[in-house]
Image (cartoon, rainbow, N blue to C red):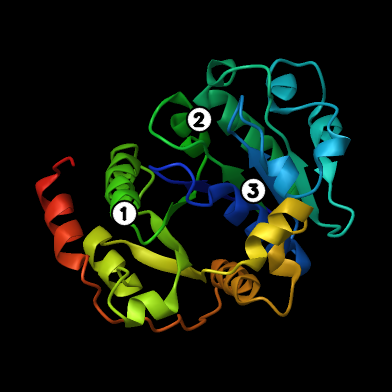
Amino acid sequence: MSAKVITVTSGKGGVGKTTITANLGAALAAQGQRVVCIDADIGLRNLDVVLGLENRIVYDLVDIVEGRCRMRQAMIRDKRNEGLYLIPAAQTRDKSAVSPSDMVRLCDELRPEHDWIIIDSPAGIERGFRNAIAAADRVFVVTNPEVSAVRDADRIIGLIEAEGKGPAKLIINRINADMVRKGDMISTQDIVDLLAVELIGIIPEDSQVIISTNQGSPISLDGKSAAGEAFRNISRRMMGAEIPFIDLSKRGNVFKRISNLIRSGGGD
């Protein structure tokens, strides 16, 4: 057994990276996989809250790196999902407390006993981003169907290529089917055409996601939720299954504007 390391990242904050990391981890573990989720957003710890594990933290990622605890002491097992573990971020330190080489060593130690290591990256392109992708075998870029988010995703995809971690794969979050059909939202096909990377997941807008996140219960474990099904589909694709995507192919009215922005590299 040698784990694949997946980093979930984005250029823009607030697109749903942490929710996606938690739900992919839970979905994989529910299928019998052994999964470790690592919160690499040092100083802004949130993955523990989304997983409902915030009250069980004793040690964190920086404690491991600085030798104050063993790896196992910092790993929190999810009681609902026997194969799912969390290594939380430190809240009282900054991103300089961990280096890219630290992340590589940590993941190499975890690989032999797990199937997947999923790293929740901080938004942006600074030190935390480089820490998060250092050990990655694959990088998933998350975007929303918004002009600013897609433009930022285009930039982060270029940086992933420059770091030798490409090609990235794409997850489009919060797609509203009615808005796409009316031409008021950029479609999944438009985004894929613009960013020119492989699509691995489409997650529909679903009010239950906010409820599940507030409750610390991943929606991928909810068999009745559309978003939950989307997360499970992504996890199956990660494991090699061929699962069809939702067809929301109508071109939105914003396509021309965002296409011009990306091609020109221009600002607002």
Q: What kind of residue is marked 2?
A: Asn
Q: Position of residue 90 (x, y in %)?
A: 69, 25
In this orientation, does residue 33 appear?
yes
Q: Residue at x 87, y 59 (%)?
A: 80
Q: Quadrant of the C terminus?
A: top left
Pointer 2: what residue? Answer: 131
Earlier-in-chain disc, 2 versus 1: 2
Pointer 3: what residue? Answer: 117
Q: From the viewer's perspective, is residue 70 above or below residue 200?
A: above
Q: What kind of residue is marked 1?
A: Val
Would you say 194 lies left or right of 117 here? left
Q: Residue at x 50, y 30 (%)?
A: 131
Task: State how far apart marks 2 and 1 are (Cα).
Answer: 23 Å
Q: Residue at x 75, y 62 (%)?
A: 29
Residues 79 and 75: in front is 79
Earlier-in-chain disc, 2 versus 3: 3
Q: Nearer the viewer, mark 2 or mark 1?
A: 1
Residues 112 and 70: in front is 70
Q: SS at mark 2?
A: helix
Would you say 205 lies left or right of 263 here? right
Kindly identify which numbered label has been placed on residue 160.
none
Pointer 1: what residue? Answer: 150
